[in-house]
Amino acid sequence: MTPRLQSLIDALAGDPQADRAVPPTGFTARLTVLSAAAMAFLAVFALALSLATGRLADRWASELAQTSTLRISAPAGQMAAQTQAALAVLTTTPGVASARALTDDEQRALLAPWFGPDLPIETLPVPQLIEIVEDSAGYDATGLRARLSAEAPGAVLDDHTRWRAPLVEAASRLRLLGFTAMVLIAAATAAMITLAANAALAANAQVIRVMRLVGAQDTYIASAFVRRFTLRALIGATAGMVLGTLAVLLLPSTDAAGGFLTGLGFQGWHWLWPLIIPILAGVVAFVATRHAALRTLKEQS
């Protein structure tokens, strides 16, 4: 066994004499475990939100950047002719990979969320929509509009520019909000563990005085608090992480939710991300407890 591994085992095992300064059960123990578990549970959802909005931003950026919509508004007698003229222009436009007119059923499905599934689209003056898919090079929107104005006066080109940027920005801000929530959760965890450590130090002030009388140093006493509270935070955060991951796993799928949740959760190797939450909770508990213990012991000396 290497010396480094032996020192790690000794640190986790602890010193029974020093550990007497830390109550094994009671209010501070329950507070530490429960707060770490609750914060880890919330951190799983904050992490899922950040990853889901990141995928959403990428999807919107890629899908909207490669597609455009041509809307043709013309009298009923000219609609078919202008549609064919617009398709002819699009098929000869460099940068256009494909173009097709949406069927009545497809347009009815687009309007169903607002007007219901039984909309009599055949009897209404609904514009004809043409879906345009660009290739990697893209097309010249200004030149295409000029050609369409001559061949199909009722055609209006929408290249999704005004829609794409706000949507991607909104998704990016949601992702930033998720990471901000994780930082706030870590700060709240540190505050709760600091309060619990201070309460334990105050409750065992007499034991600490006796240990000092027999020669114990502050770092020796503080190590017992650091070890005990770090282990409590690890246990609580692990339980909260498992429960949070199970809750995310039980969320309805994108198809079942009608696309509303936009795939909220983890996908692929992203399921490994929650495993870092207990580790981060242990690091936060270690730093917060050590700082609180050394400061309080210095004030009591």
Image: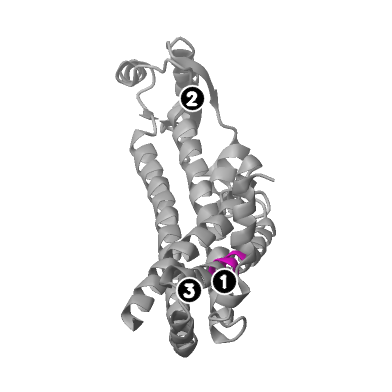
> Residue at (49%, 65%) from the top-left corner?
285
Q: Going 35% across and 44% down the picture, which residue do you hit?
A: 166
Image marks 1 and 2: residues in contact by CB distance under 8 Å: no
Q: Which residue is mark 3?
A: 221
Measured as percent of width and height from the top left, residue 38 is found at: 56, 71
Spatial CA distance of label 1 from label 3 is 11 Å
Is the C-beta separation of discs 3 and 2 under 8 Å? no
Q: Nearer the viewer, residue 173 or 120?
A: 173
Residue at position x 48%, y 25% in the image: 132
C-alpha distance separating marks 3 and 2:
71 Å
Mark 1 vs mark 3: which is more N-terminal? 3
Q: Please check the rendered image and state whether residue 229 is part of the magenta-colored stretch, yes or no.
A: yes
Q: Amino acid at mark 3?
A: Ile
| Disc 1 residue type (three-letter) | Arg
- Residue 59 in percent (x, y) is at 51, 37
Mark 3 surroundings: few (<14), some (14-19) or many (≥20) residues within 10 A: many
Q: Circle 2 is placed at which residue position? A: 132
Left or right, 178 with respect to 118, comes to left
- Looking at the rendered structure, which numbered label has been put on residue 166? none
Mark 1: which secondary structure?
helix
Magenta range: 228-234
Identify the residue position indicated by label 1 in the image: 228
Element carrying mark 2: strand
Q: Amino acid at mark 2?
A: Ile
Secondary structure under badge 3?
A: helix
Residue 26: give x, y in percent of width and height. Answer: 59, 86
Please, what is the dominant secondary structure of the magenta stretch? helix
Where in the figure is residue 261, as x and y percent of width and height? 57, 54
Of circles 1 and 2, which is in front? 1
Question: Position of 295 compared to 120: left or right?
Answer: left
* 160, 18: nearer the viewer: 18
